[in-house]
Image (cartoon, helix red, strand yellow):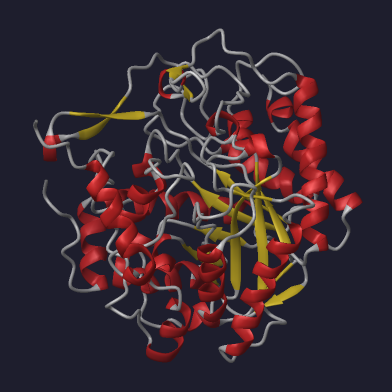
Amino acid sequence: MARYFKYKSADDLVQDAARLGSELSVQDNLAPLFEPTTVAGRRVGNRLLIQPMEGCDGTLDGAPAELTYRRYLRFGAGGAKVIWGEATAITPEARANTRQLWIAPQTAAALGRMLDGARQAHRDAGYETDDLLIGLQLTHSGRYSVPRPWLATHDPLLAPLTFDKTTGKPIDGTYPLLSDDDLQRIEDQYVAAARLAHQIGCDFVDLKQCHRYLLSELLAARNRPGRYGGSFENRTRLILNVVQRIRQEVPGLIIASRFNAYDGVPHRGVGQGDDFVGRPVPHQLPLECAWGTDLHEPAREQLDEPIALARALVAAGVSFLNVTLGNPYSNPHFVRPAEFPPVDGYHAPEHPLLGVLRHFRIAAAIQQAVPGTPVAGSGYSWLQDFAPQAAAANVAGGRITFAGFGRATLSHPDFARSLAETGQFNRKLVCRTFSYCTGLMRAKDHPLGQYPTGCPPFDKEAYGDLWKEVEQKRKPAPPR
């Protein structure tokens, strides 16, 4: 399979974008990334944001463990002024893996120590903390909960790709849906989780509406009956209720939301070896369940509803938005354009630069729709050494307020400090999108049911031996 990233300069990227029929803006002046701004009246010291990078390394009862603390200490010391904390389940059945964090009375103190540790590491590194924002991403994993799914709707394209781990079988159209009463109880659980988050010192909570977890799936639930499906009003009912209640019942807590603005359709790999390429699964048009997607031409985004959602969220009390795309389980090339797929993944059916530009284009449309609300954009990691130039141009052009860095922070947690001091990333730590982190995340053959995830190539101290162990388990057994 041909490699795509062969650029020697940011201008090479610009020229390749033009060759692909698109436009990419870059600039060498990185000053816009270090201009302060405000979120809900709070001063924030720069425009660099650490995306919610889940480590899958908590304890079985949902508390942070050694690697979790280590990751947040490194993030705190790194200089970015927004640490968007990772997916933290609101109930045990809402967890997406056995080691996902869970906010509950018995884990609250440990989560608070994790946040306090990040702030102290920020101070110890010479930074002020008055202009630092740290939050947690509150989640219900819904379709991707373990050990069994909790469905908001029957999606005919995702059903054969969704497994009930208690039986090991894919679900079908007879699988029970969460009832309207169930969703009302989940609303209460979100509010209770937000209250706990405020008590342990979160500056903000993110109500996670992305990647086809529960709140994201509801947005696409056109075929769901009852009060939470069908119309746009019904499909956004739960999230808007939760926002309004948190605003009323947990005053002083900033409310944020990372949401999908484009779902696309699921893909599956076709072919062999380097020709194992992702292709859309068979589907009928118009699509039955998709969000932000042209139902008649699903390769195209249709942003009327995502824009309406962004405006409704802001009107209800959300002060911070973070835009993402796709589904990491069924079309990961939309979520995280990569040079190399994980071991269980397919090669992208498009040039990764097109995936980056899709992120930029859609985030800019959301920011334009809510000009008074800060929006964080995604999709920067594949640009590697040249991501700062693109981020600076997007901020300077008003296309986003914050540049969100995800995988890149696992290999280079002090990327913000490096940019401030040298004007570039440390080339020895730049994420090359090898997808080792995803490979670790997908590895389940572990005594705790889940391997921790990190960056084996550039953080060998913590993850090198873990990767070797996973690789050894993947080797076929020798013939007898």
Q: Position of residue 158 (x, y in %)?
A: 45, 23
Q: Is residue 224 left or right of residue 438?
A: right
Query: In the image shown, does 270 or 229 lie closer to the viewer?
Result: 270
Q: Kindly indicate the quadrant of the structure image that contains residue 58.
A: bottom right
Q: Position of residue 81 (x, y in %)?
A: 59, 75
Query: In the image shown, does 117 or 410 lie closer to the viewer?
Result: 117
Considering every residue shown, the one lying at the far front of the view is: 480
- Figure check: 117 above or below 474: below
Q: Is residue 307 left or right of residue 479?
A: right
Query: In the image shown, does 343 or 358 lie closer to the viewer?
Result: 343
Q: Is residue 23 visible?
A: no
Q: Is residue 116 left or right of residue 241?
A: left
Q: Residue at x 66, y 78 (%)?
A: 119
Q: Residue at x 32, y 69 (%)?
A: 460
Q: Kindly indicate the quadrant of the structure image that contains residue 224.
A: top right
Q: Position of residue 154 (x, y in %)?
A: 55, 17
- Figure check: 251 above or below 71: above
